[in-house]
Amino acid sequence: MKIGFVTTHQYQNFGTFLQCFALQKILQILGHDTEIIDYRREEFKRSTVEEARITIGDFRKNPMSYISNIPAWFLLHERRTLFDKFAKDNFKISQQSWKTSDDLKLNPPQYDLYMSGSDQIWNPAICGFIEPYFLTFAPKNSLKVSYASSIGLSHLSKIEMEQISIMLSTYKFLSCREKTGCKLLADCGYTKVEHVLDPTLLLDISIWDAMANKSKINKTNYNLCYFLTETSEKRAQAKELLSDAKIENLTTDFRYSKEAILAAGPYEFLSLIRNAKTIVTDSFHGMLFSILFCKDFYMLPRHQTTDYNHQNSRIIDMLSSLGLSSRWCPISKANISPIDYTIIKNKINILRLHSIEYLQKVTKV
């Protein structure tokens, strides 16, 4: 079967790239000709000047801060190069690309099956609901399904529920990455939504090991911090939890520290997770790969739970389903038992089998 799927493949984020690769890979393993539909979302793209101001500040207001950060642009360039290499090595992308949702509707790609992929593509807090992620461009009567598509939130407004209900009405099968998402869709009238794993958990660890071996960074004897949202409070908590070895900091924010690792792509991310002794992170995929590589890890919230649009539910759901809730927001590690990964692997295998069976079912229609 020829399958085209949409996801956030163009953003140079570790989890984004690795979940995209994993979904394509598992569909290929199942025997399908699979492409990433190259929707570039340029209708939501910031200008270069605007992006620079957001990233390193407005030169006119703070010239010294701007100048002091210029050396980091070389590291950022290397980081982009490493992401580009990963995509070239591993992604099979449609030959044509589309910049806007209107472009897709005017000239849609042709597949036997259209799939909304994983990641937070249905999160209305990220640019609102984005039509192509709901396959609105697919020809009439096309076979449309979702795999592990994530809403990412704990709540939807009445208007958001009405919108999502309409946009999913032509899907044959629906699945979500989080139980919270399944419940939200049930509230929208979709009671047969299946709970499935993030695609990164569907692949054998040998695949991730082989990728980690391609890293240009090969460190040993360290603990790892990886935060998507940097705060002094998180850093203080990490130091409390990581007291027995040198701490390496993987970051996407080069303003944090000149010693932090910025020039890293997906291969380097995998290597840094695999080789760390202990990991403290607020990243969903940082957590998943810590589990895949059987690491000691602790999760801190990326957003305050008082924030209406916080994205903590996906982390809390996953930890709960694996019996790892004690790893969420620990005050100290003194009373936390070591992780028994024999039990965790057995739980993942059961969930993995169900998720693969779902993919087999939706691709045999």
Image: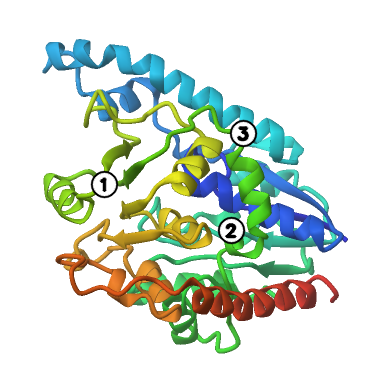
The residue that disc 2 covers is: 200
Give percent across and percent down for residue 92. Answer: 75, 41
Badge 1 amino acid: Thr
The residue that disc 1 covers is: 229
- Circle nearer the viewer, 3 or 1: 3
Badge 2 amino acid: Thr
Q: CA distance from mark 1 to mark 2?
A: 22 Å
Q: Is residue 215 left or right of residue 141?
A: left
Residue nearest the viewer, comparing 315 with 326: 326
Q: Is residue 150 left or right of residue 244?
A: right
Badge 3 amino acid: Lys
Res 214 → quadrant: top right
Residue at left offset 51%, top offset 57%: 293
Of the image marks 1 and 2, the number of the one nearer the N terminus: 2
Q: Is residue 137 visible?
A: no
Residue 119: give its label. none
Q: Is residue 313 visible?
A: yes
